[in-house]
Image (spheres, helix red, strand yellow):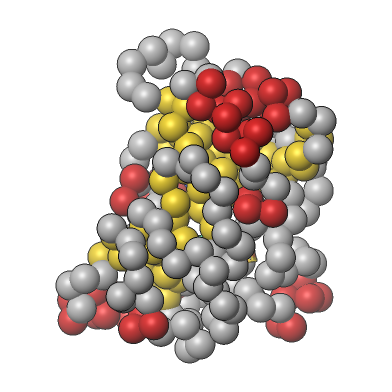
Amino acid sequence: MYAIKEAFYSLQGEGARAGRASVFCRFTGCNLWSGRPQDREKSACRFCDTDFIGTDGQNGGKFVTADQLADHLDALWPYLAASGKRYVVFTGGEPLLQLDKALIEAMHARDFEIAVETNGTLPAPEGIDWICVSPKGATTLVQTSGHELKLVYPQADALPERFETLDFQHFYLQPMDLIPLGQQGTTQARALTYCLQHPQWQLSLQMHKIIGID
Ligand SMILES: C[S@@+](CC[C@H](N)C(=O)[O-])C[C@H]1O[C@@H](n2cnc3c(N)ncnc32)[C@H](O)[C@@H]1O
Ligand SMILES: Nc1nc2[nH]cc(C(=O)O)c2c(=O)[nH]1
Ligand code: SF4
Ligand SMILES: [Mg+2]
């Protein structure tokens, strides 16, 4: 059984694949925060910008088998978008609590390339085509390799230096949004400064928020 908060077709807004047409599948639930506001300050991850509770979002629901969920996601790829490789981004919540071999095979069978957005505290199953790890605070990183490492910045307990020698092709800093409200300008300026001084790191702005899409 898979629990899905929402699923939608949009452009990837973050990181190395920003701008790419993608079906997003947002799994319900996370291992670093309950999703309830009253639990935020005592959680391992305290700055989440996402509602991942329940299955009540657009195209959300519970799916008994991998094939049922894969058919549901397949139907979100527009019929007319014939050219280019189809692409699904599994996110959440924490997708590695639910993404398994059966679902990976079901999406590959439907000719999708598969990406995941993970906090890196759980091992990724075999077969994912693009792994984006986004480390959180003092948590222990289990998934120490992948395609991009995208660090929300700044985090006092997760400095970029801790991650710069890990086995990734791309290193991104993404300015922290929302917390505390109204200080996004500050986090953008700090991330920009860090990237200018440490060219291994590139800036990732959340493009979907700037242009107002999902
Ligand atoms: C909502 S998370 C879901 C996937 C997974 N749980 C994770 O944390 O990577 C998706 C992406 O948004 C980033 N993110 C979450 N809250 C953010 C915030 N307030 N500002 C900027 N990026 C944020 C995460 O670091 C992650 O890269
Ligand atoms: N457009 C768009 N791009 C995204 N990249 C990562 C997202 C996420 O929430 O994981 C996300 C999202 O929610 N929307
Ligand atoms: S790990 Fe990801 S989904 Fe979980 S609370 Fe943090 S940002 Fe949100
Ligand atoms: Mg998001």
Q: Nearer the viewer, residue 182 or 114?
A: 114
Q: Is residue 195 left or right of residue 87?
A: left
Res 5 quadrant in image = top right
Res 173 quadrant in image = bottom left
**Residue at image point 44% right, 51% down:** 131
> Could you tell me residue 82's position as x and y percent?
38, 12
Q: Is residue 180 visible?
A: no
Q: Is residue 107 visible?
A: yes
Q: Is residue 208 left or right of residue 19?
A: right
Tag count: 0
> Could you tell me residue 68's position as x and y percent?
73, 23
> Could you tell me residue 186's position as x and y percent?
39, 79
Q: Is residue 78 above or below residue 14?
A: above
Q: Is residue 111 above or below residue 25?
A: above
Q: Nearer the viewer, residue 41 or 186?
A: 41
Q: Quadrant of the N terminus?
A: top right
> Could you tell me residue 190's position as x and y percent?
33, 80
**Residue at image point 47% right, 82% down:** 158
Q: In the orientation shown, which residue stands out farthest toward the bottom? A: 156
Q: Is residue 132 left or right of residue 15?
A: right
**Residue at image point 57% right, 59% down:** 123
Q: Is residue 200 above or below residue 50?
A: below
